[in-house]
Amino acid sequence: MDDIAESFSRLDISVPTQLPDISYNDKIITSVQKKQLTEARLEVKVNPGHEISTIVERFCNRWAIPTCAAKNFMFLATGNLKFPVLLLQNPSRDHDTLDFEDMVDSCPTLVWLRDVLQALGLDMNDVMVLDVCPLLSDSWLKSVTEREAEDAIREAYDVIERILVLLRPEILISCQCATKSWSTQLGRYASDFARELGSSRSAAERKRIVRLQHREHIFNIVQAYHPRFFIGRDDPNVHEREVLLNEIISHFMSPCGRWKVEVTILLQFAKALSILLDGMKKTESAMNKLSEALVKLSAKRQDGTITVVDT
């Protein structure tokens, strides 16, 4: 059996436990937010070379999925480990055919998210965006048999579980309800863990946070919904839905944007101070050398080594 299949078979199956829901302003979540930003560092990031890339690449190799799918997954997963994680279902349909920049530019969902984050002082590479059923495009699922699709979907849910267990994010903003639906292909084969990661628009409207204990870690899952609930639609509630999702993301991401601005200013100040101090040291060194030269010159005049000729 393939190595990745063996690793999945050894995956410690733990039934997630849903704790009582809380609201945005509950002291539990506000405490988590403050703690996360206190621990945040600019260099504490998931990047394309992070160890989760091994899990992703092995899955792609097993199912003959194009390498650009793995690269795009890792580019989207790039972000600060202490910031909330955005969880979507199939953020882009072209993740296995386009390079990252083209994928983002051609995807209305990712363009909308990029614009929202930039308005908060953040970039796409500051915030982790994860696909709840990763690396499987609609076109790929249609190209294989139903049994192969089922097996791949189940393993993809194992992949996201392993990644989240490894990264241990405190706050997830769930912008997908696909894993809660038994009527769809992705929902039908969702694991218990993936199903608990699903959200609902009604819960989002009530500003609820689902607290999920999985093994020894608690995931705080902010209830939201996919931007496709308003992108490309023209019903009367489109604007209201967009405003609400923007508010949800802004509530949790705007403190991160302010933190980034403050830290960037402090780093710029520290750099300028370092340059100033370095310049002062160089000036002091030059003054010391000049003083030593004047002392030597004075000494040589006194012993007659150097004669000053008046003109």
Image (spheres, rainbow, N blue to C red):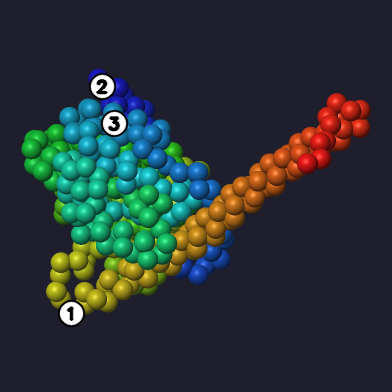
Residue reaching furthest to the top: 1
Q: Give me the residue at 76% from left, 36% from top.
A: 289
Residue type indicated by callout 1: Pro
Q: Earlier in the sequence, mark 3 or mark 2?
A: 2
Q: Residue 110 versus residue 179: which sits nearer the camera?
A: 110
Left or right of 191 in this view: 64: left
Determine contact: label 3, label 2, CB under 8 Å.
no
Determine contact: label 2, label 1, CB under 8 Å.
no
Q: Which mark is residue 2?
A: 2
Q: Give me the residue at 42% from left, 42% from top.
A: 46
Q: Residue 273 versus residue 104: which sits nearer the camera?
A: 273
Q: Quadrant location of residue 98?
A: top left
Give the class, few, some or many, for how many residues have Cα within 10 Å of label 3's Cα (few <14, many ≥20): many
Residue 3 location in percent, x, y?
A: 30, 22
Residue 99 location in percent, x, y?
A: 21, 42
Residue type indicated by callout 3: Glu
Left or right of 228 in this view: 30: right
Residue 209 visible somewhere in the drawing = no
Query: Is residue 1 positioned above or below 203 on the image?
Result: above
Q: Which mark is residue 57?
A: 3
> Which secondary structure lies at badge 2?
loop
Residue 258 visible somewhere in the drawing = yes
Residue type indicated by callout 2: Asp
How far is disc 3 from disc 2 in space, using C-alphas?
A: 13 Å
Residue reaching furthest to the right: 303
How far is disc 2 from disc 1 in space, using C-alphas?
A: 51 Å
Q: Give me the residue at 78% from left, 41% from top.
A: 311
- What residue sits right under mark 1 in the picture? 236
Determine contact: label 1, label 3, CB under 8 Å.
no
The quarter in which the N terminus is drawn is: top left
